[in-house]
Amino acid sequence: MSSTPIDQTVLVVDSETDFLDWARQQLKASGVRVITETNSANAFKIFCLEKPDLVIAEMHLRPAGGLDLLAKIRAESPNAMVIIMSALGTTQAVIESMKLGAFDFLRKESLPFTMKVVVDTALKAAAELRSAAPVKPALTVEQYHDDIVGQSEAMQSVFKMVGRVAMSDAPVLVTGESGCGKELVACAIHNYSERNKKPLIAINCAAIPENLLESELFGHEKGSFTGAATQRIGRFEQGNGGTLFLDEIGEMPLAVQSKLLRVLQEGEFSRVGGNATLKSNVRIVAATNRNLEEAIAKKEFREDLYYRLNVVGIHLPPLRARTEDIPLLAEYFLSRIAQKQHRPLLQLSGESIKVMQAYPWPGNVRELQNTLQRASVLATSDVLLPKDLPLGQVTNSAEVSDLSASPKIQGTAPTELTALQAPTALTVEEAARSLFEALTRENGDRELLPWVEEDFTRRAMELSNNNQVKSSKLLGITRATLRKRLERLGIRGASSSGE
């Protein structure tokens, strides 16, 4: 933690004074001011007076437990950084801690390996939060009249086109990458047209099998095919007087394309299995993320249908081409999230906006929305920092590291022992050197072999779900030797059942 500012303060709360002495030594070596306390009531008073950058509290405290202390601290200061620790990291304890807003949950036995890394991360987040300048929303969610948002020149051109075509009945083809918001453009065209009193019906042409798509569009008569137990009214009839949005039109089978072309040319169609000629007055808006001209060259899309659909073309730019819209879009999504979840409105730091504007957003606006949704669920403060934004991945690198190295995230041990992967790139000499360096750095007053024996034994028991047979195999000792070691080290809760 050499990068930690020297003016940061950590409050450590634990009923064991030996642990407090150890924690003080570990943290002081990193230039951090350390305050220790054994009583949770006194700890809360200290927090209110000192306003420490980080609190590390044991689960089992008196007069109130660590979770109660966490709740009081977060009520006093919603952005407070609190780490809960316990010798027994039960599923319920971990979940309750994170639910109450803990920054992290640490298993005590793993602290020699994880404490410095997690504390450094927490203190860095606390420093960023203090220095972050929240960007106030330009508009509230009530001030957005449409779900399609943007102030960039590219989006202004889209809005102008929507306004021009809204009052006509000309077919519109909306193009753009997946996730750009093509359906929102179709909704805007319908809402600003004279057809807005009639329905807007959307069909995803890629999601409906070919043998059902024709029936979905045009309907069918009773008994026209197996399973047609009753007459069905198709979307063209249901949408009469309104707008029919054909999403992913590029995926429509050629046979259905021919029948759609006839409707566009003559305004007439027949139900599947029927003889009657029906008419429907619908306005067609189609959308695709495919290059239809290339599809025409490959004989995958009808050229005559393309020109019928593309009377007016509107192209939606990808989000990476209009990064100036990202702050406004982010504000809009955060406002919607706060309103829907009945939570306070989260704000973005200026640095977070810079990070988002530098990211290419391959998933476009949909990815931005999902990213902010996830960030709002996992946020531990009312200002979203860059660390809260998992750009381009399900979990960020820190979480991946935790999953592979820290028992606190793994939860309960696996029911079956999986094969351990040997670190092929690490020689015995390198491993020994690393252990001696760790001992010097973190446990200078202990001997290597007893330290390694205890830690390896605990980790073997954890990996084997406390099964002595599997643990003894991992450690290369007999079960009798393991039992004696467990008794000597005071490790309880072990099962002696065989495989």
Image (cartoon, helix red, strand yellow):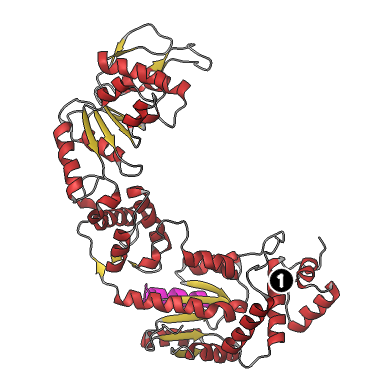
Q: Residue 219, relative to residue 151: is it above or below?
A: above
- Please tell me which residue is depicted at 39% across the width and 27% down the height of the picture: 298
Q: Residue at x 71, y 61 (%)?
A: 419
Q: Report x, y in % for residue 364.
A: 34, 49
Seen as rendered, the residue at the extreme top is 275
Point out residue 187 in the picture as x, y percentages from the top left corner.
26, 36
Magenta stretch: dominant SS?
helix
Identify which residue, 77 or 164, lies in the foreground.
164
Query: In the structure shown, which secondary structural element does the residue marked by tag 1 occupy?
Result: helix
For residue 78: magenta?
A: yes
Q: Amino acid at mark 1?
A: Ala
Above or below, 369 relative to 422: above
> Residues in magenta?
65-80
Mark 1 surroundings within 10 Å by alpha-carbon count, few (fewer than 14), some (14 through 19), many (20 or more): many
Q: In the image, is 342 to the left or to the right of 173?
A: right
Q: Residue at x 19, y 41 (%)?
A: 158
Residue 236, x across and y down, in percent: 32, 21
Residue 250 located left or right of residue 154:
right
454 or 1: nearer the viewer? 1
- Which residue is disc 1 drawn over? 460
| Residue 433 included in the magenta stretch of the image | no
Q: Is residue 280 left or right of residue 451?
A: left
Decide: is 145 above or below 105.
above
